[in-house]
Image: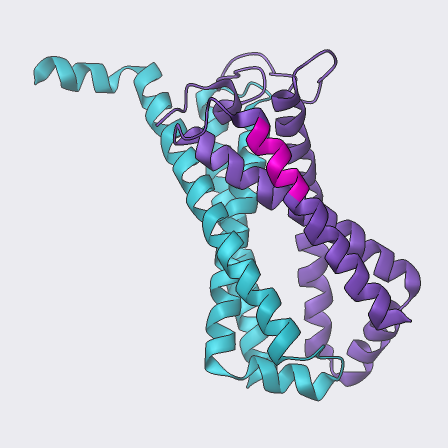
């Protein structure tokens, strides 16, 4: 048990765990996106019929299921996009401190973008 | 979980804290490396598009006139061509992403090349259907 704990605390194992989590988040958000993007497009194509008029878009967004779908889509796309940007930037060869700062900065950017977009959509729809 | 495979963690097997991987340099590499590099390139394009998309949607908050001006611009044939390009980028990134998830989980490692071409054929059919739909809509 003690040996296992020690093994877990070595820097390379910590990095492997982080890489695994990053991969899982990227893969899960990507799989969710395939599903949500399909629903998004089906909803736009078959139900919304183009949505070329301003009033139609506002009426469309004010429906609770549509608002929920768009919010989930936004969360998945932001997570997937920022995790992808992180992976690309990490391949530049960043050290552990820079990696931690990058992760925090991207998480903050994602949080701000999510809150802004949800507040914007809510204000348009209501 | 096969995160040790070169495709799952980077084209050249990069690890954090090491020298840059050079994933974009695909000269003389196999189709899997090309597919990975193209996945990243399309991903970066989609991140740019996401920013533009959110900015455009914020026009809705400025009322009908701003939105109508955007719709007039989006109906231009060049914008339709842009949409077709976007559909291609999305299809490639989505379908190849599914392949990368399967490989990362250790499924289909033996036929990864066949899987790639099968998904690309599926993407080509879907893209042609989208192009036909847009052409019918325009003509």
Q: Residue at x 35, y 15 (%)?
A: A12
Q: Compared with residue A77, is residue B20 higher up or lower down, i.e. above or below? A: above
Q: Residue at x 79, y 54 (%)?
A: B84
Quadrant of the image occupied by residue B71: bottom right
Query: In this image, A22 relative to A116: left or right?
Result: left
Q: Which residues are magenta?
A: B114-121
The chain painted purple is B
Q: Residue at x 15, y 19 (%)?
A: A5
The quadrant of the rendering that contains the N terminus of chain A is top left
Query: In this image, B1 relative to B58: left or right?
Result: left
Q: Name the outermost residue toward the left.
A: A1
| Colouring scheme applied when the structure was drawn | by chain
In this view of the protein, can residue B48 be seen by the observer?
A: no
Expressed as whole percent of the image width and height from the top left, the position of residue A19 reads 41, 28
Q: Residue at x 57, y 22 (%)?
A: A91
**Chain A in the picture: what colour?**
cyan
Q: Main secondary structure of the magenta part?
A: helix
Expressed as whole percent of the image width and height from the top left, the position of residue B120 reads 66, 39
In this view of the protein, can residue A106 be seen by the observer?
A: yes
Task: State the residue in front, B42 or A6.
Answer: B42
Within the magenta stretch, is there residue B49?
A: no
């Amino acid at each position: 048990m003690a040996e296992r704990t020690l093994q877990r605390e070595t820097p390379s194992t910590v990095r492997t765990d982080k890489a695994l989590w990053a991969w899982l988040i990227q893969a899960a958000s990507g799989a969710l996106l395939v599903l949500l993007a399909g629903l998004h497009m089906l909803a736009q194509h078959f139900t919304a019929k183009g949505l070329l008029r301003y009033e139609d878009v506002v009426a469309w967004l004010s429906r609770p299921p549509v608002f929920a779908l768009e919010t989930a889509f936004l969360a998945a796309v932001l997570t997937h996009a920022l995790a992808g940007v992180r992976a690309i930037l990490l391949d530049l060869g960043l050290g552990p401190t820079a990696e931690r700062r990058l992760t925090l900065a991207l998480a903050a950017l994602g949080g701000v973008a999510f809150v802004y977009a949800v507040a914007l959509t809510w204000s348009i729809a209501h | 979980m096969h995160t040790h495979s070169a495709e799952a963690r980077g084209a050249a097997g990069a690890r954090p804290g090491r020298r840059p991987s050079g994933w974009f340099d695909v000269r003389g590499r196999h189709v899997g490396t090309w597919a990975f590099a193209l996945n990243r390139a399309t991903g970066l394009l989609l991140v740019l598009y996401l920013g533009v998309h959110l900015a455009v949607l914020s026009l809705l908050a400025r009322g009908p006139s701003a939105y109508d001006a955007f719709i007039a611009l989006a109906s231009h044939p060049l914008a339709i061509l842009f949409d077709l390009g976007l559909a291609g980028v999305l299809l490639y990134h989505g379908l190849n992403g599914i392949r990368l998830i399967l490989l990362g989980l250790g499924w289909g490692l033996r036929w990864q090349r066949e899987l790639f071409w099968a998904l690309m054929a599926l993407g080509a059919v879907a893209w042609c259907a989208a192009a036909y739909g847009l052409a019918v809509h325009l003509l």
